[in-house]
Image (cartoon, rainbow, N blue to C red):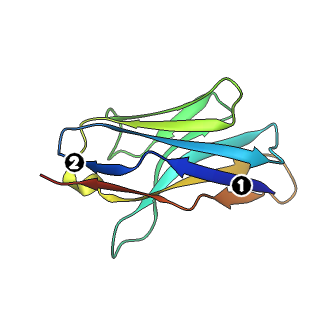
């Protein structure tokens, strides 16, 4: 099993910045994806960004150029640097871990951290 602990959410004005962190512990598979999803009130959870094996990154079109995903050298902590935040970025942000290449491709979610962007 893998556990994810997130931190870094908060309240910020439009145009501001926040950095989210998510640390994985437990049985971490050597090939994995770690990333971020978000869910705004009344909306479905949506993809934000992902880092595949601490190498390839992918972003949703809505955050491309404003958000940057990265990992630490150990590969167990993933960060989401969010710049030029907009009101529409307000959501609960969830960290996601997914194994690559295993039979069941185990997946885990963090508890979520609130990001609020308001004037």
As drawn, is 63 to the left or to the right of 3?
left
Vertical position of residue 59 compared to residue 5: above or below: above
Tag 1, which secondary structure?
A: strand
How busy is the neighbourhood of tag 1: few (under 14 within 10 Å), some, or many (20 plus)?
some
Q: Position of residue 114 (x, y in %)?
A: 39, 58
Q: Residue at x 33, y 72 (%)?
A: 41
Q: Quadrant of the N terminus?
A: bottom right
Report, in whole angstroms, how far the alpha carbon at label 1 lies from the one at label 2.
Answer: 30 Å
As drawn, is 96 to the left or to the right of 112?
right
Residue 25 — which label?
Answer: none
Tag 2, which secondary structure?
A: loop
Vertical position of residue 36 compared to residue 59: above or below: below
* 1 or 2: mark nearer the eye: 1
Name the residue carrying label 2.
86
Q: Residue at x 58, y 37 (%)?
A: 78
Name the residue carrying label 1.
3
Return the residue found at the far left. Answer: 119
How busy is the neighbourhood of tag 2: few (under 14 within 10 Å), some, or many (20 plus)?
many
Could you tell which of marks 1 and 2 lies nearer the N-terminus? 1
Toward the viewer: 111 or 40? 111
Q: Residue at x 50, y 60 (%)?
A: 112
């Amino acid at each position: 099993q893998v556990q994810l602990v997130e931190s870094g959410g908060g309240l910020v004005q439009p145009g501001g910045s926040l950095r989210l962190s998510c640390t994985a512990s437990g049985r971490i598979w050597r090939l994995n994806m770690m990333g971020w999803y978000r869910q705004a009130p009344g909306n479905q959870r949506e993809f934000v960004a992902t880092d595949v094996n601490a190498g390839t990154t992918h972003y949703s079109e809505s955050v491309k150029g404003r958000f940057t995903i990265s990992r630490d050298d150990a590969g167990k902590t993933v960060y989401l640097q969010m710049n030029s935040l907009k009101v529409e970025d307000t959501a609960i942000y969830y960290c996601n871990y997914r194994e690559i290449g295993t039979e069941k491709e185990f997946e885990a979610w963090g508890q979520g951290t609130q990001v609020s962007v308001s004037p």
